[in-house]
Amino acid sequence: MIHLVYCDHKADELNKLIRHDKTKIVRGAQGRKLPYGRVHPGEVLYFVENDGKQTIKAIGVVKSVINSPALDPAESEAMIQDHLLESRLSQEQIIQLSGKRYLCIIEVEEVMALNEPFVFERQASMDNWISVERIEDLTSFHHSLESPGFH
């Protein structure tokens, strides 16, 4: 599976990933929504900022995944704090995620900026994490997107 991951532009999340200052992505919800349970080690991640430009700017690989059991608010906050150093969450992100019943923490590796960023076609029902069989399913970009080390 290939995943398109929206990064928080305001929190400079994508640049932190590219510089390797940030190695974990945290998603949370009251229910088990994407990427919970559907992202696995070795899968490829494409990164885009939530700046309205729909430009895929970086690529990386999932190193590990933690899908929490159902959490109460205190457990949720504690789990976020346990991963704060690697996730480099902004104060706004901490507030937004604290108290979520389900957390998905994705450790990433080999994150690098693309030499040639490309635009994807946003669809009305897209969320902040999209999973597809092939990145071409979201783009009009039909050249090979294979890079050494990525499948």
Image: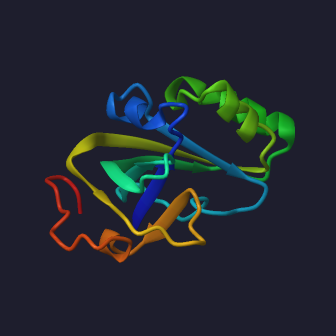
Q: Nearer the viewer, residue 105 or 138?
A: 138
Instruction: Give the quarter of the image for residue 135.
Output: bottom left
Residue 49 x, y percent position in the rendering: 45, 46
Along the viewing direction, whichever of 121 and 72 lies nearer the viewer: 121
Image quarter where the C terminus lies is bottom left
Q: Would you say 130 lies left or right of 43 here?
A: right
Q: In this view, does 74 lie above or below 72?
A: above
Q: Position of residue 48 (x, y in %)?
A: 41, 50
Q: Which of 37 and 52 is in front in this view?
A: 52
Q: Residue furthest front?
A: 53
Residue 64 position, x and y percent, is: 45, 47
In the rendered image, which quarter is residue 150 located in?
bottom left
Specify how the rendered protein is coloured.
rainbow
* Quadrant housing residue 124: bottom right
Image check: 77 left or right of 83?
right
Position in image of residue 22 (x %, y %): 44, 30
Question: How many numbered discs, if any?
Answer: 0
Residue pictured at 50% horizontal, 38% vertical? 9
At horizontal 20% and vertical 63% (from top left) the residue drawn is 145
Q: Which residue is drawn at 43% across and 61% down?
A: 3
Name the image quarter holding the N terminus: bottom left
Out of 51 and 38, give the one closest to the viewer. Answer: 51
Judge whether 131 appears above or below 6 on screen. below
